[in-house]
Amino acid sequence: MTGFERLWNGWRSSYVSSVGADGDDEPGSVFTKILRSGVSDVEANIVHRSEFVFAILNAYPYGTGHTLVLPYREVGDLEALDPSETADLWGTVTDAVRAVKAAYSPDGVNVGVNLGRPAGGSVSEHLHVHVVPRWTGDANFMTTVANTRTLPEPLVETATKLRAAWPDRRGRAPT
């Protein structure tokens, strides 16, 4: 077998079909379309907003808690951000790591940016930073043998947990 097999996740169909449903010809990345869609943050799985950036759950996560942090402004390169956006982006990435740790107690966290399509950027026109909680042995037999990922939690539950765990800018988790 080559590539990943698919494991049915019917509960995700409403989210997938709602994004860009009435604006497929509209310019912009999937993230820009979500922001323009008028759907609530709860429906869009946006877990945090700050002045220049926001955090949203990855609709196709590598694992439970996989969060993306990105600027509202659609840019593809780090150097295209202005200093205020850069500071807000990295501050929010740090907050996302804190929230993931508080909500899930992972053994570790991957933080990464893919700049450009050749680097693995699936939405390369809209810069986004991945925050992925990791556990020892989380690449189980389903991933290594069946090329399939399983997720034990619906995105709506993940979003609720991360919102509750999101720290204030002084680094403290909510009580």
Image (cartoon, rainbow, N blue to C red):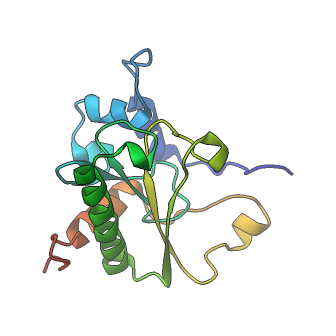
Q: Residue at x 32, y 63 (%)?
A: 90
Q: Is residue 141 above or below residue 24?
A: below
Q: Position of residue 151 (x, y in %)?
A: 53, 62
Q: Which residue is drawn at 15% across and 76% down?
A: 170
Q: Residue at x 49, y 81 (%)?
A: 108
Q: Is residue 173 above or below residue 55?
A: below
Q: Of residues 102 and 76, which is closer to you in this image?
A: 76
Q: Could you tell me which quadrant the C terminus lies in?
A: bottom left
Looking at the image, the residue that sits furthest to the right is 1
Q: Residue at x 59, y 84 (%)?
A: 136
Among the 4 quarters of the image, the one containing residue 94: bottom left
Q: Position of residue 138 (x, y in %)?
A: 61, 76
Looking at the image, the residue that sits furthest to the top is 25
Q: Where is residue 103 in the image (x, y as percent from the top left)?
A: 33, 76
Q: Of residues 97 and 82, which is closer to you in this image?
A: 82
Q: In this view, does 42 lie above or below 111?
A: above
In this figure, what is the number of numbered marks?
A: 0
Left or right: where 87 falls relative to 67: left
Q: Where is residue 107 in the image (x, y as percent from the top left)?
A: 50, 85
Left or right: where 10 falls relative to 145: left
